[in-house]
Amino acid sequence: MNETKNRARRRAIIARSLAVMIGAMALAACVQIETPDKPIEINLNINIRQEVVYRLDGDAKKLIEQNSEIF
């Protein structure tokens, strides 16, 4: 009896596999890929804002103020 059940299971698995393969083949024929006639445009509106925060040591600040022509 177990052998009969195993054969039936194998047949069912094979039948399902064939059905899936046939279905996949049928769907594959429906898919078409075509290139567009016009170029693809991508419009990006991007705002970039950058803030630089710096702190100077008191001695460095005095040095820059004394030699402002260098900077």
Image (tube, grey):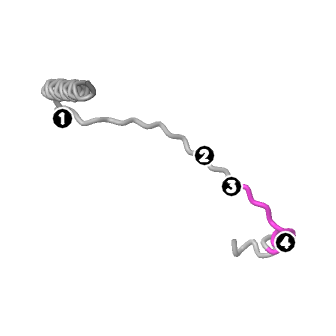
Name the foreground residue: 51 vs 4. 4
Which type of secondary structure does the marked residue at label 4 adopt?
Answer: helix
Q: Secondary structure at mark 1?
A: loop
Residue interval drawn in magenta: 52-63
Question: Which quadrant holds residue 43?
Answer: top left
Q: Name which residue type carries label 4.
A: Lys
Q: Quadrant of the C terminus?
A: bottom right
Q: Is residue 33 left or right of residue 70?
A: left
Whole-percent x and y of residue 3?
Answer: 23, 29
Residue type at mark 1 is Thr
The residue drawn where x is 14% and y is 26% is 22
Q: Which residue does the numbered mark 4 point to in the structure image?
A: 62
Q: Local crowd at mark 1 within 10 Å, few (<14), some, or many (≥20)?
A: few
- The residue to which callout 3 is attached is 52
Q: Quadrant of the N terminus?
A: top left
**Depth check: 67 or 3 in front?**
3
Badge number at residue 49 = 2
Asked if residue 56 is among those painted magenta in the image, a careful observer would answer yes
> Are the residues at dot 1 and dot 2 in contact (C-beta closer than 8 Å)?
no
- Distance between mark 1 and mark 3 Cα atoms: 46 Å
**Between marks 2 and 4, how big is the CA–CA gap?**
30 Å
Q: Residues within 10 Å of mark 3 (few under 14, many from 20)?
A: few
Q: Nearer the viewer, mark 2 or mark 4?
A: 2
Q: Residue at x 67, y 51 (%)?
A: 51
Mark 3 vs mark 4: in front: 3
What label sits on residue 35 in the rendered view? 1
**For residue 61: magenta?**
yes
Which amino acid type is marked by label 3? Val
Distance from the alpha carbon under mark 4 to that under mark 1: 65 Å
Q: CA distance from mark 2 to mark 3?
A: 10 Å
Which class describes the residues within 10 Å of circle 2: few (<14), some (14-19), or many (20+)?
few
